[in-house]
Image (cartoon, coloured by chain):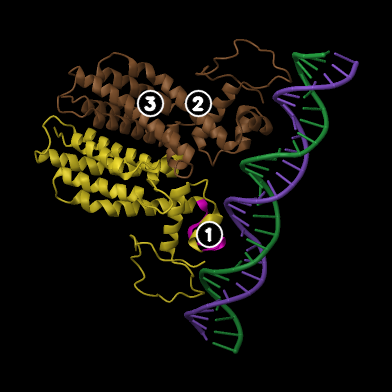
Chain colours: A brown, B yellow, C purple, D green
DNA sequence: ATTTTTTTGTACCATTTCGCATTTAATTCC
DNA sequence: GGAATTAAATGCGAAATGGTACAAAAAAAT
């Protein structure tokens, strides 16, 4: 059971330029890729339906190693979610920052979102935030906090987008950027849910297209 | 462990006006209220995290009775979901059918939705469709079909709403009813998710208000 | 080479889980 | 009252689950 490194390098790994010569037996796994595998599993099956055996098999680490590296199941879930958020943020931040017309920025954001939600060998993977909100957020305060953070972060990013566009005169005078931002987030959420239900990409793109038209005050 | 009938009569029970004189030992449970209890549990914890023991305790039925009445866990989940959809539909159908101005209809729909999503003693219960989509829809084709049905049913209801409003001249000429309908559904989805994350009702109402303003082409 | 340190690998434990087989109870039909 | 019928109650059992103890292994430090 050997790890195949089919994960992107991801964000992280700033320290340790090469080997700092650790003392004991060397690790047989790469924490980054192991966490990526765990993330994949949690995303597909959710917290409760993912067993430590599954995680062990997927990461190539036996249970005690898993435990030693990431803590118990809940901690591993939380770390997976953090990793997911880091990756998702990294994939979108450039577009949110970019200085392009509103419509183009929205198109690019939603294209990325669809890529994230629809990828996966054993079916579309959806959005971890939505999945986590649906299952764990009610009962676990820490996880709930992370979910709320994730939601408001998206709202804010879209909010900046629309405020900026309004200042540039890309939007009619009366429009409320905050409301448009919430609708933009809502569109993210609805395509995440539909992707999970295996609605084909074409239909999701149509929904996105219609949403962008409305949000840009089209026509 | 006795059932307390704190469930609304719900839709169903058309047959059997009184007792049709069944043959053997009488049932100690009311299938309708038992299913309601199961639904509550599944809504709170999801499929995987809800054990038969939990269901047994909540319904007041011991395991074999549960099994005999509803089949195995998956069947019980599916029946719970059907019941949820029936109830939700029943709560909304009158409003969708009613002949009121667009804005008023939307306000009423979202008020009902918030009631459904936010109620629950041990925290907000969210939307079963969203929860199910997030967890079970990828892996189970039958459940996936039900989720898609639920999603498209809502899209259609909103679609009729907006088409009707456009015909009446409540909307600008250029608007696309289908796009607005998808955004209306998306708003349902986003408040379901946020409710689950315990976002307070006030904030959700603000989001709804903003969405309605945009959807009605206000200002 | 020996010790020290860190990780792996095996095996185990207590609990929980789902499902069912069997027995007991309550009711109607004859 | 006794047979038939239906459901409840008990409890078993095999498998899975989360977590850990403990020994073997691989490296550095001495």
- Label 2, label 1: how far apart the Cα atoms are: 38 Å
Task: Tell me which numbered mark, 3 or 2, is placed earlier along the sequence.
Answer: 2
Q: Residue at x 17, y 51 (%)?
A: B98
Judging by the rendered image, the residue that carries numbered circle 2 is: A83
Nearer the observer, A54 or B120:
B120
Q: Is residue A77 left or right of residue B163?
A: right
Judging by the rendered image, the residue that carries numbered circle 3 is: A114
Marks 3 & 1, CB-CB < 8 Å contact: no
Tell me the chain of label 3.
A
Q: Position of residue B135 (x, y in %)?
A: 46, 40
Say which mark, if any, is on residue A153. none
Q: Position of residue A114 (x, y in %)?
A: 38, 26
Quadrant housing residue A204 = top left
Q: Which residues are magenta?
A: B61-73
Mark 2 crowd level (few <14, some 14–19, many ≥20, 10 Å Cα): some
Quadrant housing residue A198 = top left
- Label 3, label 1: how far apart the Cα atoms are: 41 Å
Q: Residue at x 49, y 31 (%)?
A: A81
């Amino acid at each position: 059971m050997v790890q195949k490194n089919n994960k992107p390098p991801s964000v992280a790994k700033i320290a340790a330029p090469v080997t700092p010569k650790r003392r004991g037996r060397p690790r047989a796994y790469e924490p980054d890729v192991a966490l990526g595998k765990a993330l994949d599993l949690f995303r597909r099956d959710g917290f409760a339906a993912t067993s430590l055996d599954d995680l062990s098999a997927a990461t190539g680490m036996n249970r005690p190693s898993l435990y030693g590296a990431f803590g118990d199941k809940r901690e591993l879930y939380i770390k997976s979610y953090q990793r997911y958020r880091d990756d998702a943020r990294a994939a979108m931040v450039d577009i949110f920052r970019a200085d392009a017309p509103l419509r183009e920025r929205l198109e690019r954001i939603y294209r990325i979102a669809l890529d994230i939600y629809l990828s996966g060998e054993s079916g579309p993977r959806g959005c971890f935030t939505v999945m986590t909100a649906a299952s764990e957020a009610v009962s676990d305060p820490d996880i709930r906090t992370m979910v709320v953070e994730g939601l408001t972060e998206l709202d804010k990013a879209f909010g900046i987008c629309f405020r900026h566009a309004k200042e540039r005169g890309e939007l009619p005078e009366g429009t409320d950027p905050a409301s448009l931002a919430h609708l933009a987030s809502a569109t993210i959420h609805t395509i995440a849910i539909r992707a999970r239900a295996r609605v084909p990409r074409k239909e999701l793109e149509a929904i996105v297209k219609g949403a962008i038209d409305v949000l840009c005050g089209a026509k």
